[in-house]
């Protein structure tokens, strides 16, 4: 039984390829974070190694071993797959040594299953050297080896790598479908399900995790409150906030993406389209902030946020990224009526 949800077209394609024995040697699964790329990759790995007539059954020994992460022929490679916690914390790319180990393992026959499956989670983090090394495997695939590349940012991959994979695009689920999933299959309260469905932006993985882990909503509330308070903060407060940001690039990207969604909500509110906003529980606050910010200010800050994401992907200094954001963030008057002084000139 496939665990992937909300992707009927993709499942139909893979099931047909399995039945016809016409699977590609390499697939590129493209879609936003938490849309289900990893689940689909593990589903396909189970289907390839399932011991029953209608794969993936989810009940045989092979399926259970893959589900539990114990199958010898299934390898997941990513930023968090390095041996040793210290190395994992410092990794910002998937390096050539990871790919050389993949090639060494791929040259050997499957140990306990029908196929060896290599899942590269976050393929956009492949270094150029690693990506070029991977090309050899993609061009001359060993028998009974399937390579699955997962990415949320296809444009960051080498075109030569993309061209040698069969692309499978996972699209966001409709908000109403995620809401129904949470209510009918997870027993989530309807109001909370509606909020989580909006916040997930079509990614069921995020909604399902947030439904059982309150820290997701707690962290979101904290981050949104910080952003909204920074609009009226002085320069000292803003730069102090920038200095507090650590070196976790993934966390920084999540924060900036959250701010992007909030800015979009501000623009929709100003344009009278409140029914389309994502942060529906912040509607009164968004209405208040929208009265003090112009569309041009909001649009310019959105551009700054997008530039910051690009800089982070290029390993820019995170503190400098956030300090620049603090300078470019719109300024609103404090309740006392005083305005902030002009932005300091940095030489």
Image (spheres, helix red, strand yellow):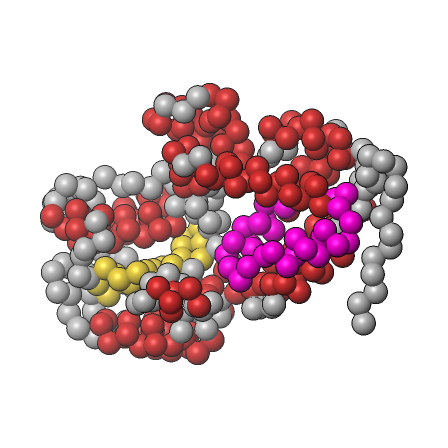
Residue 77 located left or right of residue 339: left
Q: Residue at x 39, y 28 (%)?
A: 181
Residue 307 seen anywhere in this rendered image of the structure:
no
Q: Is residue 294 above or below residue 30?
A: above
Q: Residue at x 28, y 51 (%)?
A: 42
Q: Is residue 246 magenta?
A: yes
Which corner quadrant of the image does residue 239 belong to? bottom right
Q: Residue 277, image x and y in percent?
A: 63, 33
Answer above or below: position of 312 versus 347. above
Residue 224 image offset from top left, x and y in percent = 62, 40
The percent coordinates of residue 189 (x first, y second) are 44, 21
Quarter of the figure with the C terminus? bottom right
Q: Nearer the viewer, residue 347 or 201?
A: 347
Q: Residue at x 88, y 37 (%)?
A: 337
Q: Is residue 46 magenta?
A: no
Magenta residue span: 231-259
């Amino acid at each position: 039984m496939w665990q992937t949800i909300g992707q009927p077209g993709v499942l139909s394609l893979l099931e047909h390829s399995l039945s016809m024995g016409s699977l590609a040697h390499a697939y590129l699964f493209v879609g936003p974070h938490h849309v289900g790329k990893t689940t689909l990759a593990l589903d396909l790995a189970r289907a390839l190694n399932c011991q029953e007539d209608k794969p993936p059954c989810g009940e045989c020994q092979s399926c259970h071993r893959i589900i539990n992460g114990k199958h010898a022929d299934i390898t997941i490679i990513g930023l968090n797959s390095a041996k040793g916690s210290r190395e994992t914390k410092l990794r910002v790319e998937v390096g050539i040594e990871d790919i050389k180990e993949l090639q060494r393992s791929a040259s050997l026959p499957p140990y306990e299953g029908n196929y060896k499956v290599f899942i590269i989670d976050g393929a956009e983090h492949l270094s150029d050297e690693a990506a070029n090394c991977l090309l050899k495997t993609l061009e001359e695939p060993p028998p009974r080896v399937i390579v699955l590349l997962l990415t949320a940012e296809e444009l960051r991959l080498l075109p030569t790598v993309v061209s040698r994979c069969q692309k499978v695009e996972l699209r966001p689920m409709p908000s109403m479908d995620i809401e129904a999933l949470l209510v009918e299959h997870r027993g989530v309260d309807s109001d909370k399900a509606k909020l989580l469905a909006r916040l997930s932006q079509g990614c069921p993985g995020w909604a399902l995790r947030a439904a059982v882990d309150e820290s997701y909503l707690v962290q979101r509330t904290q981050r949104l409150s910080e952003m909204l308070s920074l609009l009226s903060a002085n320069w000292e407060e803003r730069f102090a906030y920038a200095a507090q940001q650590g070196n976790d690039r993934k966390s920084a990207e999540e924060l900036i993406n959250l701010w992007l969604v909030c800015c979009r909500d501000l623009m929709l509110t100003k344009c009278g389209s409140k029914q389309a906003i994502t942060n529906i529980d912040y509607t009164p606050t968004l209405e208040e902030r929208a009265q003090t910010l112009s569309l041009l200010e909001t649009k310019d800050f959105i551009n700054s946020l997008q530039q910051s994401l690009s800089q982070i992907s290029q390993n820019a200094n995170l503190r400098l990224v956030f300090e620049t954001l603090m300078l470019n963030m719109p300024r609103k008057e404090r309740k006392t009526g005083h305005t902030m002084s002009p932005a300091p000139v940095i030489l």
